[in-house]
């Protein structure tokens, strides 16, 4: 039967994969090397793999096949033809509420929710650990930020293409994660593919800014420029300087800025963990390198392969970056610290370090808890100088 063939292939993939590359990239290469799998086969096999990853180590004592089936059971929202072939008894309960299914696995299979997430004990006290863990069995949505002036045309294009969407705000829409990005309005010109929580990361900062005058802004860990693009759209007077340690990713940023119509900016390859810029800025954005633990609903392989000792590595790196970057802030300016982590050591502990080792004053901090909105969870703290 085809379901058992899918299960066998999924188990083989899970045995071969070692976490050294993003699973989506690795799996694409696997299927390229094994061309016997058609598109339908690839979709079902990938689904089984991802469902199993979403268990983390919660059922590590079970055999591989049983883990895969239990993962599919928890990720299902109702009876499923694939699950019916693999385990009819579980399929009969597949439409039950998630909490009820988890309780059944706890009582019958030794499921442990706290073993799902690596370093569960290191979560910030602000995070509801159990709710956060349960959210990993729900596929996150795909979020679009509509650029200024494009609201009507974007919605018309989505409706014409028959793409279902839900409005989260006047400029934010949610779509099923399976939506083909090539079917969407033009990226970076009309819309920006950006998680809901990521779109909120400037909410603490923007009310403090006078966007009627030119503001000098340094995005010191710019990556592909998502936060800078967001700031530009909310505060067009901003004069941007963007930097990153990776030249290749800055090349991607430059292409995005070109599509977005942003031409007046300064870009440089720069390691903020080792040095400061001599310039003084009104605003410093520090979207710091981190564990990414608030985004693992999108990359659930990390629930198995993230090495817990890397939390301390990232925390040390973050402290070096904020110490150097904060020196480039002018008096009366604002420093914004952002991570997509849920670990206290990368967030509250770094905030305490900033307060103890710089003259910056904490003005506000907040977690944007996406686990109730099928979105990522991010941390933001804004400081004044």
Image: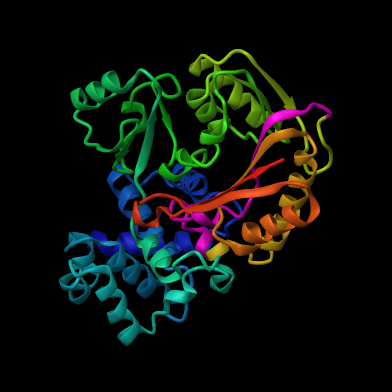
Residue occupying image coordinates x 48% and y 40%? 203
Residue occupying image coordinates x 38% and y 72%? 67
The chosen color scheme is: rainbow
Task: Estimate the x, y position of residue 381 in percent, counting from the top left.
Answer: 59, 48
Residue occupying image coordinates x 45% and y 69%? 129
Viewport quadrant of the C terminus = top right
Judging depth in this view, the residue of 98 and 239 nearest the camera is: 239
Task: Estimate the x, y position of residue 71 in percent, counting from the top left.
Answer: 35, 67
Judging depth in this view, the residue of 280 and 316 nearest the camera is: 280
Q: Is residue 9 visible?
A: no
Q: Is residue 82 left or right of residue 51?
A: left
313 inside magenta stretch:
no
Viewport quadrant of the N terminus = bottom left
Q: Is residue 265 visible?
A: yes
Task: Estimate the x, y position of residue 103 in percent, counting from the top left.
Answer: 30, 80
- Compared to residue 202, the image places residue 37 above or below, namely below
All told, the count of numbered labels is 0
**Residue 20 falls in image quadrant:** bottom right
Q: Is residue 86 left or right of residue 329?
A: left
- Compared to residue 236, the image places residue 74 above or below, namely below
Residue occupying image coordinates x 46% and y 71%? 116
Residues rendered magenta in the picture: 278-303
Q: Is residue 81 left or right of residue 235?
A: left
- Compared to residue 232, the image places residue 368 above or below, namely below
290 inside magenta stretch:
yes
Judging depth in this view, the residue of 348 and 358 nearest the camera is: 358
**Residue 333 falls in image quadrant:** top right
């Amino acid at each position: 039967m085809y379901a058992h063939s899918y299960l066998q292939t999924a188990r083989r993939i899970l045995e071969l994969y070692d976490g050294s590359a993003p699973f989506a990239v690795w799996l694409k290469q696997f299927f390229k090397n094994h061309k016997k799998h058609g598109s339908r086969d690839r979709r079902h096999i990938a689904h089984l793999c991802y469902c199993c990853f979403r268990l983390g180590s919660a059922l590590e004592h079970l055999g591989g096949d049983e883990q895969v089936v239990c993962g599919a059971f928890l990720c299902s929202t109702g009876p499923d033809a694939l699950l019916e072939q693999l385990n009819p008894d579980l399929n009969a309960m597949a439409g039950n509420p998630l909490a009820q299914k988890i309780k059944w696995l706890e009582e019958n299979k030794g499921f442990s929710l706290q073993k799902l997430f690596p370093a569960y004990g290191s979560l910030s006290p602000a995070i509801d650990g159990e709710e956060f863990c349960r959210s990993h069995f729900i596929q996150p949505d795909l979020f679009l930020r509509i650029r200024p002036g494009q609201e009507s045309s974007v919605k018309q294009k989505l409706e014409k293409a028959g793409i279902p969407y839900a409005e989260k705000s006047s400029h934010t829409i949610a779509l099923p994660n399976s939506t083909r990005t090539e079917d969407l309005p033009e990226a970076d010109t009309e819309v920006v593919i950006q998680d809901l929580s990521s779109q909120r990361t400037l909410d603490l900062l923007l009310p403090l800014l006078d966007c009627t005058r030119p503001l000098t802004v340094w995005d010191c860990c710019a990556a592909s420029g998502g936060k800078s693009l967001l700031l530009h759209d909310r505060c067009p007077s901003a004069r941007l300087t963007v930097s990153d340690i990776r030249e290749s990713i800055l090349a991607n940023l430059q292409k995005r800025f070109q599509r977005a119509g942003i031409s007046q900016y300064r870009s440089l390859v720069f390691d903020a963990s080792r040095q400061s810029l001599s310039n003084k800025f009104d605003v410093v954005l520090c979207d710091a390198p981190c564990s990414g633990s608030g985004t693992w609903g999108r990359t659930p392989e990390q629930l198995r392969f993230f090495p817990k000792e890397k939390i301390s590595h990232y925390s040390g790196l973050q402290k070096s970056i904020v110490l150097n970057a904060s020196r480039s802030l002018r008096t009366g300016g604002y420093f914004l610290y952002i991570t997509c982590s849920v670990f206290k050591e990368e967030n509250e502990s770094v905030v305490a370090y900033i307060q103890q080792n710089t003259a910056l004053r904490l003005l506000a901090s907040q977690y944007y808890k996406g686990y109730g909105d099928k979105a990522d969870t991010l941390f933001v703290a804004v400081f004044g100088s």
